[in-house]
Image: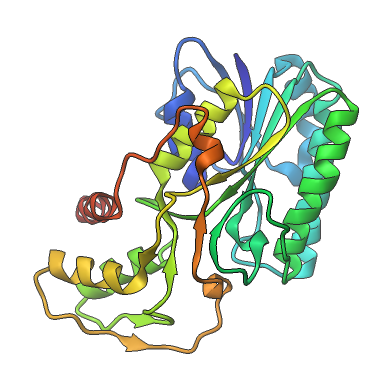
Amino acid sequence: MRIFITGGSGFIGRYLLKELNIPQNELLVLTRNPKNLKQYKNIKIISGDLSRINRSSEKIKVFNPDATIHLAWEGIPDLGIENSVKNLTQGLSLIELLAETNCKKIIITGSVWEYGNQKGRISEDVQTKPFNSFTLSKNTLHLLGRELAEKNGISFIWTRVFYVYGPGQKESSLIPHLINTIKNKETPEIRNPLAKNDFIFVEDVARALKIILDKEKNSGMYNIGSGKFTSVKSIIKSIFNKFDIKEKYQNTDKKLIDSVNYLCADISRLKTLGWTPEITVKEGIEKMIEANNHK
């Protein structure tokens, strides 16, 4: 299969490439950081980004992808209106370009935050509740992108990724923040230790995207999560125990987008494709601490 990937050198993208880099596939990756992919000798790379997609359009058309996985979203953590609308526009332009190729399937990663402040176990059929420029732009890309793709005979699959974590995650995220501050003998700041969310290891996310690519032929929507609630408090305790030190942290009232709490993915739809999460939060934390020790 010929697969075009945006954001292939990003957090999820690097793990997805490991899953897809098999003899049966040809991969073309659009990235601003080609050096991050130098270990892949058999992957075709376009150096650039979606803001300059016109410069790359001929290379994409020549590659003529069977499928596209769109992971890129520039400017994070900038969630403002200008950056969000820019990413929305670029996503729609990408779909328009793909309509000029043989592409038959587009998979795009959305976000758990599209569900807004709803609580509990949530299925793909629940109505979204965008609450800022970022979530509104994601939701709009889903709706307009689906219409544009299907109008051109392309299957459109939207995924909502829950609280993904793993080695390579941004340092300000909960688990890397805890690991780094503890190693530096500092006191971590935690906004809401009583929150419970659905934490999913990045390798499981990559496997989920691969199985959707391989098995889903029609348009659709999938939650990608563990299907279980994990409390922030239990993660804090687990990490302090790993370092064999007394649990100590301070609360902070910093307002973050991940103030959306108490959401868990209904993953029954994804399970019908034969996928289940394999890595527990305890195992994932161990992998992250080990990776941190080898930096």
On the question of residue 172 being in view, the answer is: no
Q: Residue at x 40, y 29 (%)?
A: 39
Check the image and name the residue furthest to the top: 24
Check the image and name the residue furthest to the left: 244
Q: Position of residue 269 (x, y in %)?
A: 56, 38
Q: Position of residue 99 (x, y in %)?
A: 85, 25
Q: Position of residue 284 (x, y in %)?
A: 29, 51
Relative placement, left or right, of 26 versus 163 is right
Q: Residue at x 43, y 88 (%)?
A: 252
198 over 234 or under it: above or below: above
Residue 132, picture quadrant: bottom right
Q: Position of residue 188 (x, y in %)?
A: 31, 80
107 over 116 or under it: above or below: above
Q: Residue at x 39, y 51 (%)?
A: 168
- The residue nearer to you, when weighing 41 against 18, is 18
Scheme by which the image is coloured: rainbow
Tally of numbered tags: 0
221 over 257 or under it: above or below: above
Q: Quadrant of the N terminus?
A: top right
Check the image and name the residue furthest to the right: 151
On the question of residue 182 being in view, the answer is: yes
Relative placement, left or right, of 1 versus 195 is right
- The residue nearer to you, when weighing 245 against 129, is 129
Relative placement, left or right, of 43 versus 110 is left
Q: Residue at x 88, y 25 (%)?
A: 152
- The residue nearer to you, when weighing 15 against 135, is 135
